[in-house]
Image (spheres, coloured by chain):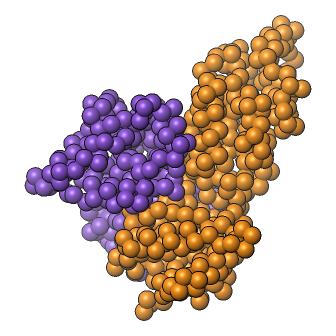
Chain colours: A orange, B purple
Amino acid sequence: MKLSVSKRSEQIVLSEIRSMSIECDKVNGINLAQGVCDLEIHLLTLLRSKTVSFNKLFFYKKKSLFMLTFVGLGLYDEEDLTLKGLEAIRNADVIYAEFYTSPLGGKTIEAMERMYGKRIFVLERSDIEETAEGGILKLAKHQKVVLLSGGDAMIATTHLDLRLRAIDMGIETKIVHAPSISSAVAGLSGLQNYKFGKSITVSPAYKDVISEVPYETIIANRARGLHTLLYLDISMSIAEALKLLEAVEVNKNGNELKQTILVGIARAGSDNPVVKADYMNVLNSYEFGALPHVLIVPGNLHFMEKEALIKIAHAPEDM
Amino acid sequence: MKLSVSKRSEQIVLSEIRSMSIECDKVNGINLAQGVCDLEIHLLTLLRSKTVSFNKLFFYKKKSLFMLTFVGLGLYDEEDLTLKGLEAIRNADVIYAEFYTSPLGGKTIEAMERMYGKRIFVLERSDIEETAEGGILKLAKHQKVVLLSGGDAMIATTHLDLRLRAIDMGIETKIVHAPSISSAVAGLSGLQNYKFGKSITVSPAYKDVISEVPYETIIANRARGLHTLLYLDISMSIAEALKLLEAVEVNKNGNELKQTILVGIARAGSDNPVVKADYMNVLNSYEFGALPHVLIVPGNLHFMEKEALIKIAHAPEDM
């Protein structure tokens, strides 16, 4: 339904846009320029819609409402963000997303746009780490900008870095939290949350060199009886991670990992997560299905944790 | 709007209810009995509504759809659960909630009932830990039951225990994850998630004996350079927790905690969280406002974490 707009209303909107002093051609990157143009269209659409009121337009000028909000998308698909997250998206002027710090999982940009009712612009690493001052941060000085990312918000170092740069530029920042793999693994496996020690990421070998840090972290946690959550590189499977850990153990003449029940988890947060506990020689050929995967190396097990691994994660009963 | 119901339809619904073989007076506890009666009313309402179809009634018989779903409510208010969590509530027959493992925070039962469009029955600890087999678990054998709790789902031992008993009774269980304080503190403080060691709860003194375990956990984590997240007892403030920790340190002739920048966080997930970093002698009189509170004892700080504590948590610049 389209209503006609009076000349006077149109003028007010256009002067609002001018007062933001952003010009498309001055903004770096195609995505960002598109974002500004979209805002212009958005303002006019607002005005042409039945629900528009002048109060609604004035928020574009009120400085305290211009901010950068980090919204976590949660674990797996487009329904894993919170109601608060959805509200932040619906109230924002421009929505960005990045998927280089955590995987898309079971969602697509199209499914998110459909469900949230907003256009989403995907940023590359360089848009955030190199050219943000001329792009996303420049926009956030004048508009309500949301940055979406997988899992809980503001966990990756790259987000903290962006937040600190935003604060330096006088931009207000806000976080809308979401489910995180770091607490989900406890519920899914039955291993108690407070018994996890330091977590660590398993990365692919770099120039044939395999990092020993994940293995050493496991050993240090186990010395205190603690479980270790291993985040896997964004495209790494449980089988690949086990191969890297095993190579380090062989190299160190160790056998602790080989003799331990491990827990693999695939697609946490989805309707069909796979949680399987067994020894390395079983898990490395177990069919976990599609990514994302994570791996847990348990420390000392309480009897209820043992029962959980058998009943929930189908560990061998004589473990 | 009320439509008339045919005799035949009414008979079908009543036979459905009978086939569930649950009678109100056989169920322990007022809340649970109320739940069953409500279901009966719910079925009749369904039938009397414009949208009812016989397909919709038949799901009450399909065994695979009867299950116990643990839905996390997230951090603070009624908007902190996920879209998936809301869907689980709306599709459930009976909704229970417990608030003895984590606080209500900024929500009320009334606000949740209004937003989710369902009646919520609050369970006591004994309903879950003692009489569940005759109550919530008995219902979950025949209906879709949801158990709501604060934070992420299935983190408390009491939930794991209930889940294992459900599995023993052949009841399918499911988890709908939600934001957890354990990952939220990283985003809020700027301290990196993977640098947290084992977490621990600070409990009130019991018969004048203060547990030394939280203090020892801090020291063990710091020996590896790691941060410690201290969960506080459900009604404990940061000032009270500091008093307990300080008493242990004095008793042990230690001074590590006294000389360390600590981080207090109040009302994580709300619109006005307070995040303040300073030494113990400043924090113990700092006005954090309403509960819930948590406390972080940082380990070694990366330069970006230090910058974050100064810019986000207003730590002294010469820390």
Give x and y (percent) for residue A43. Answer: 79, 23
Q: Nearer the viewer, residue B69 or A295?
A: A295
Residue most extreme to the right: A25
Residue at screen point 27% across, 59% down: B216
Q: Quadrant of the C terminus of chain B?
A: top left
Q: Nearer the viewer, residue A235 or B115?
A: A235
Residue B2 in view, yes or no: no
Give x and y (percent) for residue A233. Answer: 67, 65
Give x and y (percent) for residue B109. Answer: 40, 43
Q: Nearer the viewer, residue A234 or B273?
A: A234
Residue at screen point 51% across, 85% down: A254
Residue at screen point 22% across, 50% down: B254
Residue A12 in view, yes or no: yes
Number of labelled discs? 0
Left or right: A58, with B77 as reference point: right
Left or right: A274, with A297 as reference point: right
Give x and y (percent) for residue B76. Answer: 45, 42
B281 in relation to B47, above or below:
above
Left or right: B248, with B200 as reference point: left
Q: Nearer the viewer, residue A253 or A180?
A: A253
Residue at screen point 52% across, 47% down: B302
